[in-house]
Image (cartoon, rainbow, N blue to C red):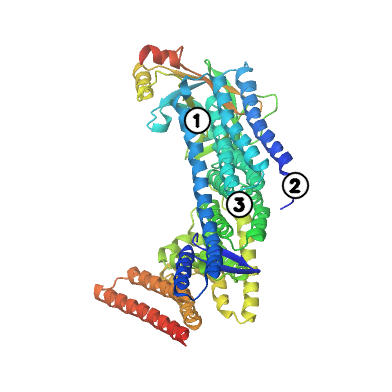
Amino acid sequence: MINVSRKPVFIVICACQFLVIMLLIFMYFSTVEWNDHIYRFRCKSEQPFRYHSKRYVTLQLDIQTFPREMYTGETNLTKGMVVYCTFRDVHGYHRIASISTKRPHPHEPFMKTRISNVYEDSYKLEINFSRYPLYSDRLKHDSVHKLQRKIVDEGKVVILDARISKRGTAYAKKLYVGDLHIEDYAYKKVW
Amino acid sequence: MGRILKIMEDGQTRRASPSRVRWMLSEIQYVLKKGIIDADSAHKLTQHYEARLLNYKKILLYIFGTLGAVLIGSGIVLVIAQYWFSVPRVVKLLLSAIVLLTAQILVARFCLFAKQNNRFVDESLAVFWSLSFGSMLYLVGDILNLPRAHRTFLLTWSLAVLPIFYLQKSIASLFIYTGLVIGWLSLVSNEHGVAVPLYGLYGALVPFYVWVRRRDKGSVRHIILKYWLAVAAIISVALLMHYPFNWFLIPSYAGMAGVFYFSGELFEAEEEKYLARPLTIIGLFGIFVHSLVMSIEDIWLFYRIDTIIYDLSIPSYTFVEDVVLIPLLLCAGSIVISSYCIAKRKMWFHTVPALYCFLVIALNLISMYVHNSFIFIFPWIINIYTLVFASLYVFRGFKKQSLFHMNVGSLFILAVIVIRLFGYDMSLWIRGVTFICIGSAYVFLNYKLIKKKRKIFSS
């Protein structure tokens, strides 16, 4: 092994580690907090029976699956393939307008994701922002379960307010049940 | 493995297990009482052997110290988790940085600015540092509800651990690194072009391995590292090949087992204990297990290229397989050449396992043009090969008075016979008699060898 002084190397490693973390935080704030372009996705909440994710509402977004006809590209879409989605506004919600394996024009907003599964008549997208955390002290062991049952019973529309960065990374910002923020809804109906 | 102590004296490497050293210490007291040696010699001998025992205790300290660091790291994370949801977001971000900062400060204080370096401290703090970076990365992701990109998370973490084990010269951190790389690979193995970054990630280990080999060749540290890297390579190839699960898996594993076996025979030949030869052991058992799997007729039917049905979503030949297969075949080729060299030095015995991967590839190719009703021939050919291979081992064991070779050979023969017995419909009577015969032969061979050894020892 090359003999180099360990101290400067140590300082560089420490700085790089913090730099990576700072970069993550900066990317989050630049996309979620300092960005006015809102994407609203309709979704259903899934039942989370996993103990370790009891504080999270797991969502199933409408945009998660799309029919094969929508994709008009030449190459076959396979599992794990990177795709770029563009959206259009339909009655206040965003739906997929196009899917492509090529990166869209820089000025056109897009979401970068992957194909998570291929079915006979449709494709499933990998949506990695579909888990919404509930930060509350009132949260009991089965609160999320009760909350989700209530949403289904009342037939409420669940809307995820998301932000998408220029590089195509999507972040979940807020989750609404009807017009109420999910924590307010839970406060009124469940807790 | 952990019970082997390395004793370096006048440039000579000598090994002794702790129980032998303890026996030696008691023996010194005994011969002193009998008056065979004087008190001064007894004192010098006691001091000499006690130093060996201390070395062994250091190894234990090293293992438990690393375990302790892992537990401390996990404990801190759990304590913070208890009160996590009632803390504001900014405070959470600062708190998550504290763990990493603490690790860095500890490393600076006890490793970089310490008067004397201690390997146990270096290892423990390297583990703590590696885990603390991962925990901070995870916590930041959780606090800000960042998209759950597991592959990016694992890759970032592994890249952060890479300089840590180089700086701290820590094997435990290297284990974390390879674990993370395997975790990342398990998520991306079905994607195009994964092999190239994977080679890069494993290639980064080469300078470290070379350094450990030069510095601690033959030590417990070196042997454990070799075992670990061999296992990591096997898992990685399995992950790369599992999807699409196809024909390439068979020659790749056979080739890899051959590579391990001959690398072991070439580079580990000077090791006296067989357990201290991880490449040979893994390669040998790799060839054996592979040959047993290939004894199953259904495998031959399933894996024939013309019968593989590709799903619409799976490309027929991907970059990953091509990139992985070519080096494996090249390695296998080079191994055959090297085994030829070994054979020239009257080590012809090693050329038999060298042929295995090529036998498998050739039989697979031939099986494509053979009708299904004749497929049963191929498992039989493989079985005959294994029997020849195993018999050579028994023969060698008898010739060199090596119980290891003889028992391994017998085990292989036994396994092949068992597989054949259960593969066909036979009466319990035949099976029972066969087992009795094999068992008797096994006991007889061991008895003969031990008797032969005793005879040599007494003469």
- Disc 1 and disc 3: Cα gap in Å? 28 Å
- Disc 1 and disc 2: Cα gap in Å? 51 Å
Check if mark 1's residue and mark 3's residue have beta carbons within 8 Å: no
Q: Position of residue B409 (x, y in %)?
A: 45, 75
Residue A72 in view in this figure: no
Q: Pointer 3: residues within 10 angstroms few (<14), some, or many (20+)?
A: some
Q: Pointer 1: residues within 10 angstroms few (<14), some, or many (20+)?
A: some
Q: Chain of mark 3?
A: B
On the image, which quarter does residue B8 sit in? bottom right
Q: Nearer the viewer, mark 2 or mark 3?
A: 2
Amino acid type of disc 1? Answer: Gln
Disc 3 marks which residue?
B320
Determine the residue located farthest toward the bottom in the rendered image: B459
Check if mark 1's residue and mark 2's residue have beta carbons within 8 Å: no
Query: In what element is the residue under mark 2?
Result: loop
Amino acid type of disc 3? Answer: Val
On the image, which quarter does residue A46 sit in? top left
Query: In what element is the residue under mark 1?
Result: helix
Q: Are marks 2 and 3 on the same chain?
A: no
Amino acid type of disc 2? Answer: Val
Q: Position of residue A157 (x, y in %)?
A: 43, 17
Q: Earlier in the sequence, mark 1 or mark 2?
A: 2
Disc 2 marks which residue?
A4
Q: Chain of mark 1?
A: A
- Disc 2 and disc 3: Cα gap in Å? 37 Å
The image's mark for residue B379 is none
Residue A79 in view in this figure: yes
Left or right of residue B5, residue B198 in this image: right
Disc 1 marks which residue?
A64
Q: Position of residue B32 (x, y in %)?
A: 47, 71
